Image (cartoon, rainbow, N blue to C red):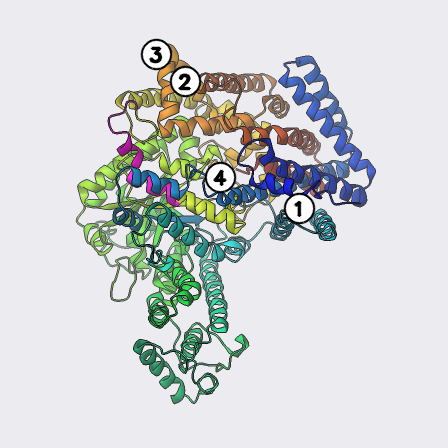
Amino acid sequence: MPSLWTPPNWPQRLAELQAPTGDLKEAPLRRDVRSLGILLGSVLREQAGDPLYDAVEALRRTAIARREADAKEETEAAASHLQQALCRVGALELSAAYQLARAFGFYFELINLAETNHRKRRRLAIQLDQNAAPQRGDLRGTLRRLREAGVDAAQAHELLKRICITPVFTAHPTEVARRSVMFKRRRISDLLEQLDRIPVPTPHLESLERDLTAEITALWQTDDVRSARPTVRDEIRMALDYYETSLFDTLPVLYSEVAAALAAEYPQPNADSQPVAISELPQLVSFGSWIGGDRDGNPFVVPEVTREALAMAHTLLLNHYRRRLQNVFEQLGSSIQQVPVSAEVTALLDHYLGKLRAAGQTAVEQRFHYEHLRLLIACIMMRLGATPQSGLPLPADPALTPYTRAADLLSDLTILRASLAENHGHRLAQMLIDPLLLEVRTYGLHLQTLDIRQHARVHAAAVTEISAWQAPSGATSLTSELHLPPALSPQTQEVLDTFRTIAELKQTYAPESIRQYVISGATSSEDVLHVLWLARLGGVKVEADEATHDPGLQPVPLFESIEDLQNAPAVCRQLWTSEVYRPLLKSWKHRQEVMLGYSDSNKDGGMITSTWEIYKAHRALHEVARECGVTLQLFHGRGGTVGRGGGPTHRAIFAQPIDSFTGELRLTEQGEVLNWKYSDVVLAERNLELMIAASLDALARPDAILQQGTMPPHLTGEILPEWEAAFDQLSATSYEFYREHIVDNPETFTYFEQATPVAELEHARLGSRPAKRGGKKSMADLRAIPWVFGWMQSRQLVPAFFGVGHALDRFVKENPGGLALLQTMARDFPLFLDIIRNVEMALAKADFGIARLYASLVEDEALRDRVFATLEAEFNLTHRMLLEITQQKALLENNPVLERSIRLRNPYVDPMSLIQVELIRRKRAAIAEGKPDSPELNRAISATINGISAGLRNTG
């Protein structure tokens, strides 16, 4: 029987892969989805029997019929189909419900892989067409607009020197999949990629299909739900996996793309000129992590875990460098009998060999007597910890001291490269050494910076406790000295232990391994001074020290609530002008990082107000920084979902205030999006390129130059007075409505706890961090992550839209020409366009027909009806207003790819939602009857959580 991937003919398959637009380009995705569904069906039959397969098909068909009836506004028919599905689910045995949830969840695992493979496929298709116009978001497109705006090659290079984007990996909310599942995903992804090759012999196609079936079988036989909560170490390991999976190989590809874009848009005047070498490009990327350093609310992040985080990153990096150098050693056999080496190489080699000879370690020199470059590489490898296990005649305990500074490793590699370039080996230098130089400049000896984070109130409590033992006045000044009390509370002891560990680790590892200390919940300059005082008490040198190459430890205030965002500029002005702080700024070369929180500001004030207050804080902070002579770098705490600041990253970067960007940017990459963005070299390169291009665009604003004098400005980032006034009004209206019905209405919190599966988050074991804060039950104590998680799982997505429709409707009604103004803003102003698109996507994922079933879980019928009616009315109003503003007949009309993906996914998500509601109902009934907690029931509910997360491509 021929493979499901056997084409009618190979030219047609090639045409599909090359198709620039239309149905033909989507044909490979449709084939993958259909074929993977068929394979999964056969695996289900084989592994679980026909009854499970038949139940899956019956639920799937009923869900599709309900969706089709809804689309035709056939209300009675839709209700009838939903009732049929509910009856089927209600009759399920627990084991069958669990298996059904798994089946639908695994379908999404496969569909997500198919869509990811299609993204890679389309990326390749675009690269194949040399005549295709650069896409918006491509670096080449940005460079072209720069050139058209009059920016010459030298100026473009200077602008690139100012760009550096730093993705900071965080564990929360962690990837729902277990690490073993992620490995299986990658194998399936590799097989799908092989099926795209042209041509593939029929036996090979059949073999690939058999391998795919085997991997799907292995996936089905693997526990999808964790039996134990992952440890912080597990989370560290999962994030580090992305370096070996893709990032190490991505860096040279990324810089090659940058060099090619520069060469294409700024060609050398001399045809014989060499293109820019990737090692000559400025550093555009660095990496950071919170995993193992983020203590805020996670009692499992203790000093030993932080030590482990740095040790694991250091070991991973040195192993990688040694593998790279081993490869260079094997390929570079240059002999001084054939080609000379530079005097610098000879001098450096004499220095190293002298130490080895003195220790009687001469085997490697004798083996490679004439191959001086190999000898130098062997010495570099020894300093990186290589031993005889590398396959070279290296001593077990080399006499060469390990590298303690990345600059020394970079210097040795630069000398090696220069020697090659000087002696007719420039191609060897570019192929073998340049990628290594890039990596050392990017990763240093630490791979990624590890941020430490703790809440301001924890520091304040520690300062109060310690100061009470000392003097009542001036005890917390940065220069005060004191003796510690004989006994400290566990919390204060942990704070001091953290700072002592930081001091120790900055001595043990590269000092730049830890350079930022993030202060959650910062409200005043005192919050920053508390950290400095405690750090010094713990032995940390907070000032930068050029002599030891220690960047110090800079406190990074994180402004999260609406009020704190509004106060942030005044707080920073007070800090930056204080006599105590200015010497520290000087040591940091007058650079300061400030973090803006998206999750809590959204939970506090709703979508519009959160976005607008972050924008205004961003702009005002830069104004204050300029006044105070400070170079400000903002750290954006974006989540994976729209309700936590999610959405396309490149679009958000470009939507920053004009003239309020230095070119350097740090932003969090949540655990749930890492697989989507960094699981593959093609995806990682594209994601990083988008961020670099958006940063260059936001820094240079070529469209503003090209459109000078044009009114209204189209997507330049400029904001007109009437747009700002409109945003002020929208924000005020939205904030008042959101606070009244969400934050200040206790009924909403009660509804949320009962009408969503938030209480089940604990059993899903998504991450090491506890889901609840100290067992308290109030809106104020609820974390943003479970807040968004609960609404997402229940298909209500309240944080992404509530208050938006009300504000838009009021604005149109109260302002003549208001609708036309909002339509203009949605077309021309990036910030407003970003809000509209993100809300539109959330509305497309939401489903208030399904949400009504979750609402039925609320015990107080009158409360349920009041809250649900408010939420549904706002959902419907937001839906109507978005269509009016975007001038569409249906959501996502202008984004057919996303619309199709969501439309095709929803009928498969719906059954899992129905199963989840039924299982939660059973669990609550058991609790009411006093029955013990059922691990089997919890596992089944967790399977629905995993499946819905995979289907909606979000956890929280």
Q: Position of residue 779 (x, y in %)?
A: 47, 31
Mark 1 lies on residue: 224
Magenta extent: 692-712
Q: Nearer the viewer, mark 4 or mark 3?
A: 3
Q: CA distance from mark 4 to mark 3?
A: 35 Å
> 248 or 563: nearer the eye?
248
Q: Earlier in the sequence, mark 1 or mark 2?
A: 1
**Can residue 114 be found in the magenta stretch?**
no
Q: Which mark identifies residue 808? A: 2
Asked which quadrant contains residue 614, the reply is top left
Q: Earlier in the sequence, mark 4 or mark 2?
A: 4
Q: Main secondary structure of the magenta part?
A: helix
Q: CA distance from mark 4 to mark 1?
A: 21 Å
SS class, disc 4: loop
Q: Earlier in the sequence, mark 1 or mark 3?
A: 1
Q: Residues within 10 Å of mark 4 (few under 14, many from 20)?
A: many
Q: Height in image: 464 above or below 391?
A: above
> 249 or 543: nearer the eye?
249
Q: Earlier in the sequence, mark 2 or mark 3?
A: 2
> 280 or 461: nearer the eye?
280
Mark 4 lies on residue: 640
